[in-house]
């Protein structure tokens, strides 16, 4: 995909993926931590809810299971934000963009419409990820690389659902 | 110390995701529309390298696994719901944070939706725990356990399969 805004060529995905694989191994060896992201959203939701409904949150089983606290994974997710921010600035690919190009070409440049789709999709994606007990990081990377049955089953279902939705939205185009 | 490790690991991962353009909606939908397999190449390479490294260190007794239980009801139904949402949003939870980092403003709405989705799941959790999450509970299960073979007999063929998939992608220019 040609992007006139990007002055640098993207890194080869095989090289990037291999380096990420070494990073996983290093993280498991050094810190005993496998990659994951979606539990963080539970902790943030629990924290935000507890600022208005402290007693209710304190009695909810799911928030007791995943306490609203700062942990390795929350810092990992914050790190992804930070790393992407610095890398895009240094590589001249930082771009304040309300609507992705592919979406705009199909549905138009309305930031409101894109925002609503992203918001609703986010709700569905996170509800599903929690029901599946992981997202493409926790199941897709960490689960499959440990050869866990749950990882392969969930990853296959992620793609089946995604292929169906992409077909509904974009048809054959 | 854990927290600093988390931040540093995330930052390095974020740089790699950003440099390979894996964070972009266009790349993620490219894979789901079977047009551009960049994210699949990245992901499967990470998995194969991670698999060999982690199981190698496991054999040396240097690391522990952290396998999530296979609960087929949750994994399948949740996985499909995630996929449908992913097709709409075009970011997964980790990449949404990175996409916001490189200025993609729609990722802000995605993250907000994800926080709401987590809150809704917490509401539904007690009922799901008695239903979906009891269906097909197989416990912490790995493929080598299912097949009753040494893990390297799974890792070897898996790596070969991935390389064949990559050759197919390159041949089809995906």
Image (cartoon, coloured by chain):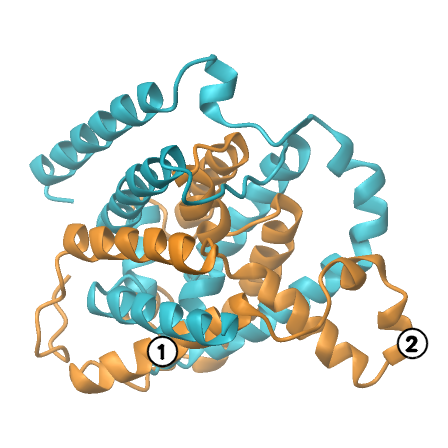
Chain colours: A orange, B cyan
Nearest the eye: A100 or A93: A93
Q: Quadrant of residue A91?
A: bottom left
Residue B32 in sight from this viewpoint: yes
Q: Horizontal and vertical percent for residue B131?
A: 81, 36
Q: With A87 as the anchor, is A170 left or right in this view?
A: right
Q: Where residue B37 sits in the image (x, y, percent)? A: 23, 47
Residue at x 11% of width, y 76% of height: A4
Identify the residue shown where x is 44% and y is 45%: B63
Of the image marks 1 and 2, the number of the one nearer the N terminus: 2
> Foreground residue, B117 or B57?
B57
Mark pair 1, 2: CA separation: 43 Å
Q: Quadrant of residue A144?
A: top left
Crowd around label 2: few <14 · some 14–19 · many ≥20 (10 Å): few
Say the numbered circle drawn on residue A109. 1
**In terms of secondary structure, where does tag 1 sit?**
loop
Q: Quadrant of the N terminus of chain A?
A: bottom left
Residue A42, percent from left and from top: 66, 65
Q: Which mark is residue A37?
A: none
Residue furthest front as drawn: B61
Say which residue label 2 marks. A55
Packing grade of label 1 (10 A; few <14, some 14-19, many >=20) is some
Chain ID of residue with mark 1: A
Taking the spot 45% from the left edge, 42% from the top edge, the residue there is A164
Please give left or right for residue B14 compared with residue B90 in the image: left
Label 2 element class: helix
**Parent chain of label 2:** A
Q: Is residue B130 above or below residue A69?
A: above
The part of the image, by quadrant, that contains residue A13 is bottom left
Q: In this picture, is B78 found above or below B38?
A: above
Q: Are marks 1 and 2 in contact (CB under 8 Å)?
A: no
Spot the residue most to the top: B148
At a point 35% along the width and 41% down the height, the residue shown is: B57
């Amino acid at each position: 995909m040609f992007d006139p805004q990007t002055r640098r060529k993207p890194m080869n995905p095989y090289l990037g993926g291999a380096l990420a694989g070494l990073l996983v191994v290093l993280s498991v060896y050094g810190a005993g931590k496998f990659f994951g992201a979606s539990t963080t959203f539970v902790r943030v939701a629990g924290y935000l809810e507890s600022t208005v409904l402290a007693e209710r949150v304190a009695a909810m089983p799911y928030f007791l299971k995943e306490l609203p606290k700062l942990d390795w994974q929350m810092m990992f997710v914050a790190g992804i934000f930070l790393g992407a921010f610095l890398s895009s600035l240094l590589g001249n690919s930082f771009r304040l963009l309300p609507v992705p190009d592919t979406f705009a070409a199909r549905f138009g440049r309305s930031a409101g419409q894109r925002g609503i789709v992203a918001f609703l999709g986010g709700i569905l994606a996170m509800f599903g990820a929690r029901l599946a007990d992981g997202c493409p990081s926790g199941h897709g990377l960490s689960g499959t690389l440990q050869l866990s049955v749950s990882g392969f089953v969930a990853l296959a279902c992620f793609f089946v659902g995604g292929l169906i939705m992409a077909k509904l939205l974009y048809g054959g185009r | 110390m854990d927290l600093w490790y988390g931040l540093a690991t995330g930052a390095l991962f974020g740089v790699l995701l950003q440099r390979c353009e894996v964070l972009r909606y266009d790349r993620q939908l490219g894979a789901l529309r079977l047009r551009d397999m960049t994210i699949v190449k990245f992901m499967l390479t990470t998995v194969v390298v991670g698999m060999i490294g982690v199981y190698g260190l496991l054999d040396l007794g240097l690391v522990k696994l952290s396998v999530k239980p296979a609960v087929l009801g949750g994994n399948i139904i949740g996985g499909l719901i995630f996929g449908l949402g992913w097709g709409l949003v075009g970011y997964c939870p980790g990449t949404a944070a990175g996409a916001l980092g490189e200025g993609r403003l729609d990722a802000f709405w995605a993250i907000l939706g994800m926080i709401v989705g987590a809150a809704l799941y917490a509401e539904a959790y007690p009922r799901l725990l008695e239903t979906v999450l009891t269906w097909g509970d197989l416990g912490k299960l790995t493929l080598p356990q299912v097949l009753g073979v040494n893990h390297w007999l799974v890792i070897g063929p898996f790596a070969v399969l991935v390389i064949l998939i990559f050759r197919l992608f390159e041949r089809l220019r995906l």
